[in-house]
Image (tube, rainbow, N blue to C red):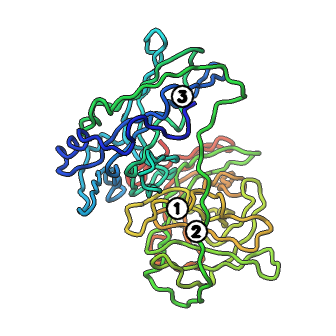
Amino acid sequence: MAAVGLVIATAAGAVSATAAQGTAGQTGSAGPAIKLVVAQHNITAPRFGNQVFVDPGIWVASLGAPLQFDVGRTSYTSPITITQVISQPGLPPEMRPLPASVLDGWNGLKNFASLTIKNKAGRVVAATRLTLCPNSFDPERTSPDSPSTSPYPQQCAAIDPFQIGMVWGIERGWAVDPAQAGLTYRLALGTYHVTESITPVYARLFGIPAADATATVVMTVVKGNACCLAAPRRPQPAALPSHPAVPAMTNPPESALPDLVALPAWGIETEHVSGRDLLSFAATVWVGGNGPLDVQGFRVNSSPVMAAYQYFWQDGQVIGRVRAGTMGFDSQPGHNHWHFQQFAAYRLLGQSGKLALRSQKTGFCIAPTDPVDLLLPNAVWQPSFVGLSGQCGSPTALWVREMMPVGWGDTYIQSLAGQAFDITSLPNGTYYIEVIANPGHVLHETTAANDMALRKVIISGTRGHRHVKAPPWNGIDPER
């Protein structure tokens, strides 16, 4: 396998003048010099069965300046656009619109590179086009002179289909590996040459010299001595922020308030379980506004329920708190953590708007799982951690903090028994899945006008064979 550490044989901090001139010729400013760099020229890849995980350790580096893109849409009915943001010291950022054809949806730059595997005789035995997600889960520095940290998120696309805005980027002097997430091929034991090449459209677009746009490593496939393919590395969650004791508030300022926003349901489907027909779905509540959602629970007199408080941040400091609901520990399989019990609610409404069913899902471990709009002025590109790890607490916890920064959402897949809608006895017809954020109005936010979202569904079929159809929402069809 390719080594974890990034070793560049040439002077890693040097910027290719030709590349910089090429970018400048197209944009008017000296942008980043993009270059393929090799971790090591000879790698060993174990084979399990007839499958080989291939990560050649060829990295896409941005030298001289960051490679940054703003990706977003002005509304859900508007197309996704991409703009390169070119930053130089002492100069205002230059915005360079790029053609939408370079987008692989929210996943990254489509067909950015090609990966080709040749056997010892020089015959091509495998070839793949690679999408480049600049927001790698494992970006790496190219030299000791590189900045010590990267500000960019560690994912390009969200699970939720209703993303609004995203920032993609490779920090100056950093690199990402487009093949790192995992590619497997059927290969025999032996020696191969693995080549990655930046495709001509991107070489022209970013002024990349031919010598910097291709790289090759020699790969030796050997018999594996373990049970399974190696899994990609995953980052460990960072520590939570800390703050001193803060005063209680009665009227927190709007400048410190989050805005909870409910998004429409998606992933809508029916299933037949233990003689019942269930309607399951997924939904996201995200945070906009002026500050993060910070909810903390404290044990009181050994009670099984924690008293919850909402904390308010301004200019990177906590300025106050208010009492806000409760937290309870959910010991059911798939949970085993503390839930804030007033975060969101789900209802199924009839065509007239009358309540037909209510989901039993009421509690959540609040955590950033999906970026929704990182182009907001107060958005956080890189949360302390993504997902539930590290902040949901243990059964014996005295204190739990659950946070969600601006621009991020918490997606929950409503498929567990007792939480999906039981439509066994429900008549066929048109219904609406209602997603409600802050249903008890215990959280302070900038506005409650966007706390509710509806998604139309049409239920049909017979008992044991129920079907559901969800028409597109504002032209977006996650169920297709």
Up-down relation of residue 286 to residue 235 (above or below): below
Who is closer to the viewer here, 192 or 136? 192
Query: With 111 as the anchor, is 141 left or right in this view?
Result: right
Q: Secondary structure at mark 2?
A: strand
What residue is pinned by disc 3?
Answer: 54
Give the x, y percent position of residue 290.
43, 75
Question: Residue 402: percent from the left, percent from the top?
Answer: 62, 68
**CB within 8 Å, label 3 to label 2:** no
Could you tell me which secondary element the residue under label 3 belongs to?
A: loop
Figure disc tally: 3
The answer to whether any part of residue 241 appears in the image is yes
Label 3 and label 2: CA atoms lie apart by 37 Å
The answer to which of marks 3 and 2 sits earlier in the sequence is 3
**Image vertical order of residue 276 relative to residue 245, above or below:** above
Circle 1 sits on which residue?
Answer: 383
Badge 1: how crowded within 10 Å, few (<14), some, or many (20+)? Answer: many
Whole-number angstrom distance, CA of label 3 to CA of label 1 = 30 Å
Give the spatial CA distance, label 1 vs label 2: 9 Å
What amino acid is at disc 1?
Answer: Pro
Residue type at tag 2: Met
The mark nearer the N terminus, 1 or 2, is: 1
Is residue 107 at least partly visible in the picture?
A: no
User: Which corner quadrant holds the N terminus?
Assistant: top right
Question: Depth-wise, is mark 3 or mark 2 nearer the camera?
Answer: 3
Q: Residues within 10 Å of mark 3 (few under 14, many from 20)?
A: many
How many residues crowd mark 2 within 10 Å: few (<14), some (14–19), many (20+)? many
Residue that numbered label 2 is attached to: 403
Secondary structure at badge 1 equals loop
Q: Are marks 1 and 2 in contact (CB under 8 Å)?
A: yes
